[in-house]
Image (cartoon, rainbow, N blue to C red):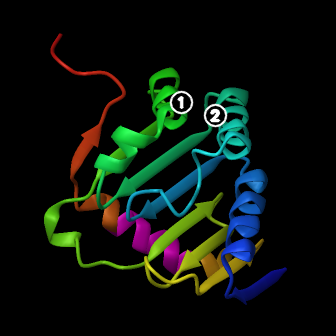
Amino acid sequence: MDSRLISSWAEHDSALQTILTLASRSLCIFDEDLTKLKLERPDNSEILQRFLGSDRQHTARIVVRNAEPFRRNSPRLMRLLANHPQTMTVFESPPHLASLGDSIFIADDRHAVIRFHRDNVRAKVIIDRVEECRAYVHRFEDILAEGGEQVFATPLGL
């Protein structure tokens, strides 16, 4: 349907919220630390809560290069992770992936916001285009396959 480039943070935020709202089965997210995605904002975390809570088959798989800001500054997301441990997973990517600079936000393998560099707003928005999303889905799966440390909402071993 739609594919376009965006070049402002306002467009970026609006596109992310649109993609989040369109999600009906899965979310795949790869980002530096989730800060620029603003998933911690009340409106976005509420959309994510509704998505995860509406069906046990819905999944949110997240890979971050640096999990410390997530652990320290994301109480809403940590609560979602605690409440939906079977359907929401968060991994910190291994150190050898630290040089990757892009950000991937994909819903249902057909909608996406792809930011070309972690520090720059230039991004591509893809709506309802499975073929165009396919390469980004494969990239996300390759990144996820590299492993890393899983982030848990509660300390383990206690």
Establish if 10 lies above or below 79.
below
User: Mark on residue 60?
Assistant: none
Q: Residue at x 15, y 15 (%)?
A: 157
The CA distance from mark 2 to mark 1 is 8 Å
Q: Residue at x 37, y 55 (%)?
A: 63
Q: Are marks 2 and 1 in contact (CB under 8 Å)?
A: yes
Q: Which residues are magenta?
A: 134-142
Q: Residue furthest top?
A: 158
* Amino acid on which the number 2 mark rests in the picture: Leu
Establish if 22 lies above or below 14.
above
As helix, strand or loop, the secondary structure at mark 1 comes to helix
Classify residue 102 as left or right of residue 123: left
Q: Residue at x 29, y 47 (%)?
A: 68
* Residue 12, quarter of picture: bottom right
Which residue position is annotated with label 2?
52
Which residue position is annotated with label 1?
80
